[in-house]
């Protein structure tokens, strides 16, 4: 007889960085496990130190970290945590990134620009990640930048279920805030059985980076419009699109997006907007300065937890969204 046989069972361990611990705790509760105790701190010069307080040898490790502000700090912490797991002999390392940083930089628009979304994938792979679990990427092709499995989760079922119970279907219209989000809006329209409209931006050819007119393609007069997007950063595009809908006779406007980045002037823009409700998921923590009654945050923890369980048990993540294995 050669070799040694073992009868050990698979072991799953869940880890969290410091970017969004509330979401990690929700996911852990859904899975019925505890987060692995972790020591994380900065040296005086800002360098990050991480150490796990339990052995990870032979374990299937799932590390959750959303890329929120300060985004570069949390990305670096995540890379260091992956490296620590690799050097501690983890059996597998699955990285859960509810909001994938730099996904907007997915191609070169002009010469001498980076493709930072690809660089992110290379960094994760080099650090030691075997799999990425992420949600509503800004561009679907980013999945192909990582040399390994990528499980792409969708917030669409959670968001549309909420909208369906909130708005009269007979008056509902789904609206894309620009031409680039039409495909996303079309999925919403199919799911809700609602007509689709588009806000088309026209730019002044004589003034750089200046939008002068927002034309609405589709009937929104007297309708309750749901503006949909994957993320809202400063809020400029979405609030201008909402103004265009009201100018064309919309009865009400609701905004729904997976990722509420909400940086810079977003707080003031959302506060002063005539939009009745902004709906986000908890893929990112809501900034403390954006404390508005008209913001609703829906939890994606059950979806993430189910995806983790499917991966750990060698099941099908696709079945979560398509209803089949």
Image (spheres, rainbow, N blue to C red):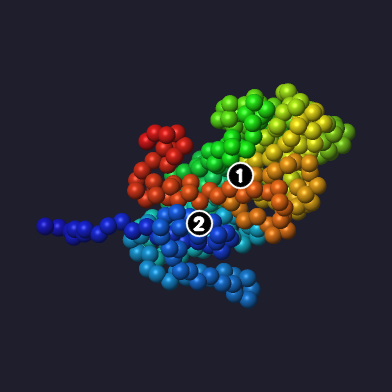
Taking the image as shown, residue 239 lies to the left or right of residue 261, namely right
Give coordinates of residue 138: x percent, y percent.
61, 41
Say left or right for 241 vs 324.
Answer: right
Quadrant in which the N terminus appears: bottom left
Label 1 crowd (10 A; few <14 / some 14-19 / many >=20): many
Q: Residue at x 79, y 44 (%)?
A: 273
Residue on which disc 1 sits: 258
Could you tell whether 313 is left or right of 273 in the image? Answer: left
Label 2 to label 1: alpha-carbon separation: 17 Å
> Does dot 1 land on a helix, a strand or a loop?
strand
Q: Residue 217 is drawn in which quadrant?
A: top right
Q: Nearer the viewer, residue 303 or 123?
A: 303
Dot label at residue 315: none
Q: Is residue 218 above or below residue 25?
A: above
Which residue is most to the bottom? Answer: 44
Q: Going from the N terminus, do you reach mark 2 or mark 1 first?
A: 2
Front of the two marks 2 and 1: 2
Q: Nearer the viewer, residue 13 or 190?
A: 190
């Amino acid at each position: 007889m050669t070799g040694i046989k073992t009868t050990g069972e698979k072991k799953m361990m869940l880890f969290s960085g410091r970017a969004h611990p509330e979401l990690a705790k929700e996911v852990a509760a859904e899975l019925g496990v505890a987060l692995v105790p972790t020591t994380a701190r900065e040296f005086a010069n800002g360098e990050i130190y991480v150490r796990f307080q339990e052995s990870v040898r032979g374990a299937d490790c799932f590390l959750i970290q959303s890329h929120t502000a300060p985004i570069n700090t949390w990305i670096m912490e995540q890379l260091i945590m992956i490296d620590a797991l690799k050097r501690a002999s983890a059996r597998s390392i699955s990285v859960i990134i509810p909001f994938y940083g730099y996904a907007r930089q997915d191609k070169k628009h002009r010469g001498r620009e980076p493709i930072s979304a690809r660089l992110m994938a290379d960094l994760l792979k080099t650090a030691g990640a075997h799999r990425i679990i992420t949600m509503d990427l800004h561009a679907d092709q980013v999945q192909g930048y990582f040399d390994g499995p990528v499980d792409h989760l969708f917030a669409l079922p959670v968001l549309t279920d909420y909208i369906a119970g909130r708005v009269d279907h007979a008056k509902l219209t789904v609206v894309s805030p620009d031409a680039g989000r039409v495909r996303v809006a079309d999925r919403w329209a199919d799911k809700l059985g609602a007509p689709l409209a588009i806000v088309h931006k026209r730019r002044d050819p004589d003034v750089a980076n200046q939008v002068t007119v927002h034309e609405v393609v589709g009937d929104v007069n007297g309708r309750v419009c749901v503006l949909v997007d994957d993320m809202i950063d400063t809020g400029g595009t979405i609030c201008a699109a909402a103004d265009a809908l009201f100018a064309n006779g919309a009865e009400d406007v609701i905004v729904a997006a997976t990722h509420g980045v909400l940086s810079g002037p977003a707080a003031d823009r959302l506060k002063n907007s005539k939009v009745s409700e902004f709906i986000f998921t908890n893929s990112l923590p809501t900034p403390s300065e954006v404390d508005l009654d008209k913001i609703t945050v829906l939890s994606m923890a059950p979806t993430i937890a189910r995806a983790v369980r499917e991966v750990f048990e060698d099941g099908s993540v696709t079945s979560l969204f398509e209803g089949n294995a």
